[in-house]
Image (cartoon, rainbow, N blue to C red):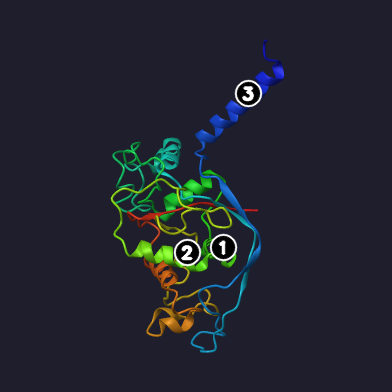
Amino acid sequence: MRPGKGWIFGAAALLAASLVAQAIGAEGPAQAHLPVGDYLPFFKFSAGKGQTNSESRPIQVGAFRLDKTPVQNGQFLDFVRAHPEWRRSQAKSLFVDPRYLAKWRGDLAPPEGEAQAPVTNVSWFAAQAFCEARGLRLPTTEEWEYALDDAGRERLAMTQSALDWFSKPNPRRLAGVGRSAPNGYGIYDLVGMVWEWTQDFSSTGSGTEQRNTAGKDDAQFCGGGALGVRDATDYPAFMRYALRASLKAAYTQDNLGFRCAGDE
């Protein structure tokens, strides 16, 4: 029985859409849909710079989409094939440091056997370019932390997973993504595999010009660091914010990856 014209046209359309997606580097992880909700941030709100009457106050995070897993080596390979300017030998030093894609064996050769492992040694600029090629962006820090908070579900277990991860040296080879249990939003590997870039990763660092002094006071990063946070016993959160504050956009690390977000 010969297929009808409708089937042929439909198959051709699907093939064309697939080729277009590959051409722009649009392939990436499936995304979870996170609803609008309240989230109690790690840092307290302050009435003003240098004031001591800070308080914990929930904020509302709008609905958004987030990759269910970190971006994999194989997915980043599709991206650099379509965007040669982000290959290891061609990326501009303004946007990447010398260890960009350091684990790769060449421009188009990810670590052997790690196609499904998280891509690492990727700068903020490269991560953002990957997301933009998919019509997406990096998640904000608040969105990332909101996803990790998971509406309070399994909070103690997540904290323990983070502590267990901190207690071990970085493995020489990373495992494939999505092998652990997902959280309540259907998101995998927020802790236990790699640190992850956020869009505004450096927004909580202290300096001579802070943009949001009403919300994040200098004292949080000076001698009285624990005074400005909601829970001084939340060691994993201290680690996450300290790491973000230490980064610059061109930096890369062996255990630093990313995932993409999108607006609903």
Upstream in the sequence, badge 1 or badge 2?
Answer: 1
Upstream in the sequence, badge 3 or badge 1?
Answer: 3
Residue at label 3?
11
Q: What is the x, y in percent for residue 59?
A: 61, 72
Question: Which amino acid type corresponds to the residue marked 3 in the rendered image?
Answer: Ala
Residue at label 2?
158
Asked if 197 appears above or below 175 in the picture, the reply is below
Query: Which residue is painted at 42% across and 49% down in the image?
Result: 126
Which residue occupies the foreground of this view, 80 or 176? 176
Dot 2 surroundings within 10 Å: few (below 14), some, or many (20 or more)? Answer: some
Circles 1 and 2: CB atoms closer than 8 Å: yes
Question: Which amino acid type corresponds to the residue marked 2 in the rendered image?
Answer: Met
Residue 244 shows in this picture: no
Query: Which residue is painted at 44% across and 59% down in the image?
Result: 191
Mark 3–mark 1 Cα distance, whole angstroms, equals: 40 Å
Residue at label 1?
150
Q: What is the x, y in percent for residue 61?
A: 62, 65
Disc sitting over residue 170 in the figure: none
Q: What secondary structure is found at the residue carrying circle 2?
A: helix
Upstream in the sequence, badge 2 or badge 3?
Answer: 3
Q: What is the x, y in percent for residue 58?
A: 61, 74
Q: What secondary structure is found at the residue carrying circle 1?
A: helix
Mark 1–mark 2 Cα distance, whole angstroms, equals: 10 Å
Which residue occupies the foreground of this view, 161 or 87? 161
